[in-house]
Every structure is written in C-alpha cells, then in structure tokens.
Amino acid sequence: MKTFLLIAISCIGFGQTPRVGRPATEETIKAMDLTVFPDGRGLPPGSGTAVKGKDVFKEKCSVCHNDKGEGRQGQYPALVGGAGTINTPKPIKTVGSYWPYATTVFDYVRRAMPYDQPGTLKPDEVYAAVAFVLNANGIIGDNDEMNAMTLPKVKMPNRDGFVLDKRPDVKAKK
C-alpha cells in the first residue's frame, strides 16, 4: 500500500514546472556574459598595476593565498613559483608556470574570486590583482599597466606548452 501511495503522489507531480525562480532578463543575461578570449575579446574597460594590486590582493586574496601568493599548504593553491617544473615528474602548477594566457587568469579571477564572494571584484580590482600575480611571477614589471590592450600581449611562460585539439569534430582555430 505504501508503494502504491508513493507512486501515486509521484505521478501527480509530473507535467508541472517547479515554479522556482523567475525568467532571466536581458540585463541579467548580459551581466553574466563574461567570456574573455585569449586574444582579449571580452575584456572590460579598466586597468591596474602590480603596485595597485598589492593592496587589492592583500585585502581580497591573501586570506587564502597568503600575502605573496604562495598559497596555504593543503588548503588553497600557490599562485607563484613552479618555474621550470612543468616538464618534470613533479610539476608545480601555478599561474606563472602553467597558465597559457594572462586573459584566462583575468577571466577566472573575475568569475570565481574571491572564493567566498565570487564575481564581486570591479574590473580595476581584477586587472590590479592579476597584475600583482603576474608581477610576483616575474612576468611583468611593478608599474606595467594591465588593461584590455596590454593584457592579451603578455607572453606567459607556458603559452607554447599546450597543443590544439586536432580532432575533426573540434572547431578550434589553427
């Protein structure tokens, strides 16, 4: 009898929508359309330097990644270091050793950081924090301004460490 009742109650719910949330508005969709490509398409206006980024990083990032981006062992990853380890038996994957594009770093930080409040950083804060991390890895100088024009030009150390997917069903630029 219990099984019959459970099946009957379950069937009543079929065909109904859950009535949770509301349809996304055009403004909501536009606000979430944040894709940044390796060539810089999609980067917003704004700018930042490592000097400015030091304060942003300390306030918004250091609780997880420590003051210099060295991470917290077993908790949060290091963002600096690992140079020359990618092709070794024990690679250390950091922004400076592994990531192929500085624009991808920007995209990730804008979407996912800070961990407890993702998406709350303003574009200038993201540019500055990314500049701080790039500088800490020796990739850019203290006062090199990162913006929509300069960030795509940053040559990451492992840019050539990735290969295009050559399967015929993948539509990648060659």
Image (cartoon, rainbow, N blue to C red):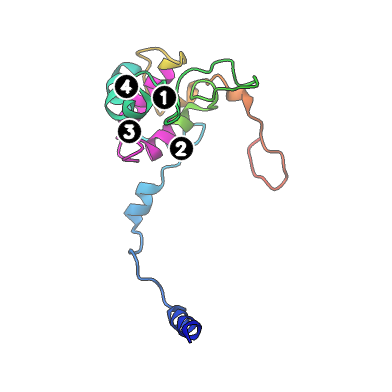
The residue drawn where x is 66% and y is 34% is: 164
Residue underneath mark 3: 123
Q: Residues within 10 Å of mark 1 (few under 14, many from 20)?
A: many
The residue drawn where x is 54% and y is 16% is: 83
Residue 53, labelled with which disc?
4
Q: How far apart are marks 3 and 4 (CA)?
A: 12 Å
N-terminal of the two: label 4 or label 1?
A: 4
For marks 2 and 1, give the one nearer the viewer.
Answer: 1
Picture layout, residue 27 above or below residue 135: below
Pinpoint residue 58: horizontal percent, then vertical percent: 29, 23
N-terminal of the two: label 4 or label 2?
A: 2
On screen, residue 133 versus residue 161, left or right, reads: left
Q: Is residue 172 visible?
A: yes
Q: Residues within 10 Å of mark 3 (few under 14, many from 20)?
A: some
N-terminal of the two: label 3 or label 4?
A: 4
For marks 4 and 1, give the one nearer the viewer.
Answer: 1
On screen, residue 10 versus residue 98, left or right, reads: left
Q: How far apart are marks 4 and 2 (CA)?
A: 20 Å
Pinpoint residue 18: horizontal percent, then vertical percent: 38, 71
Q: How far apart are marks 2 and 3 (CA)?
A: 13 Å
Residue underneath mark 2: 36
Q: How crowded is mark 4: few (under 14 residues within 10 Å), some or many (20 or more)?
A: many
Residue type (three-letter) at the residue carrying disc 3: Pro
Q: How far apart are marks 2 and 1 (CA)?
A: 25 Å
The answer to which of 82 and 75 lies nearer the viewer is 75
Q: Distance between the residues labelled 3 and 1?
A: 23 Å
Q: What stretch is highlighted in magenta?
A: 106-135
N-terminal of the two: label 2 or label 1?
A: 2
